[in-house]
Image (cartoon, rainbow, N blue to C red):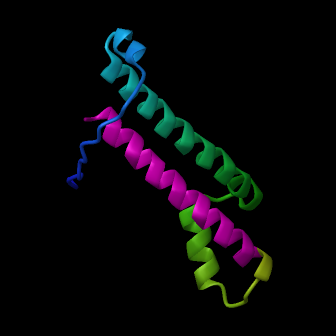
Amino acid sequence: MATTTQTKIELRVPSWISDIEPAQKSFYDFLLSYAFSKAQDYKARSQVYERKYCVDFPKFERSLHSSPTEDIKKWDDFIVWKALYDSYQKWERRYHELKNR
């Protein structure tokens, strides 16, 4: 299992934040929700291409690289889809990292 680097940060917040019980858990819950939301956003945006090509990204990438002809429109879609897929993977990892801490 990969190890994660942790960084301790100090935040200056209004004093009323300490009235939230417990403030640290509320902040953690926010981060968890944020990571989940980001992952779902990238997943939904990727699904446009999954529906268009009727395959998931890894299969599309393999077929594109093994194709004897070059289709510029598919390569344009590949560039955008790869960015969306990589971003989804990144935020999905971050979500699970937070969830399993």
Horizontal and vertical percent for residue 3? 20, 53
Tell me where residue 20 sits by quadrant: top left
98 in relation to 2, above or below: above
- The residue most toward the bottom is 68
Q: Could you tell me which residue is drawn at 23 percent across and 48 percent down?
A: 6
Is 2 situated left or right of 20 in this image?
left
Q: Main secondary structure of the magenta part?
A: helix
Horizontal and vertical percent for residue 22? 31, 14
> Is residue 100 on the magenta stretch?
yes
Horizontal and vertical percent for residue 61? 58, 72
20 in relation to 74, above or below: above
Instruction: For the C terminus, give its image quadrant.
Output: top left
Q: Could you tell me which residue is drawn at 36 percent across and 40 percent down?
A: 96
83 in relation to 63, above or below: above
For the record, the magenta segment spans 74-101
Q: Could you tell me which residue is drawn at 66 percent across and 45 percent down?
A: 44
Q: Nearer the viewer, residue 65 or 12?
A: 12
Horizontal and vertical percent for residue 30? 45, 28
Is 44 situated left or right of 38 in this image?
right
Q: Could you tell me which residue is drawn at 73 percent across and 52 percent down?
A: 48
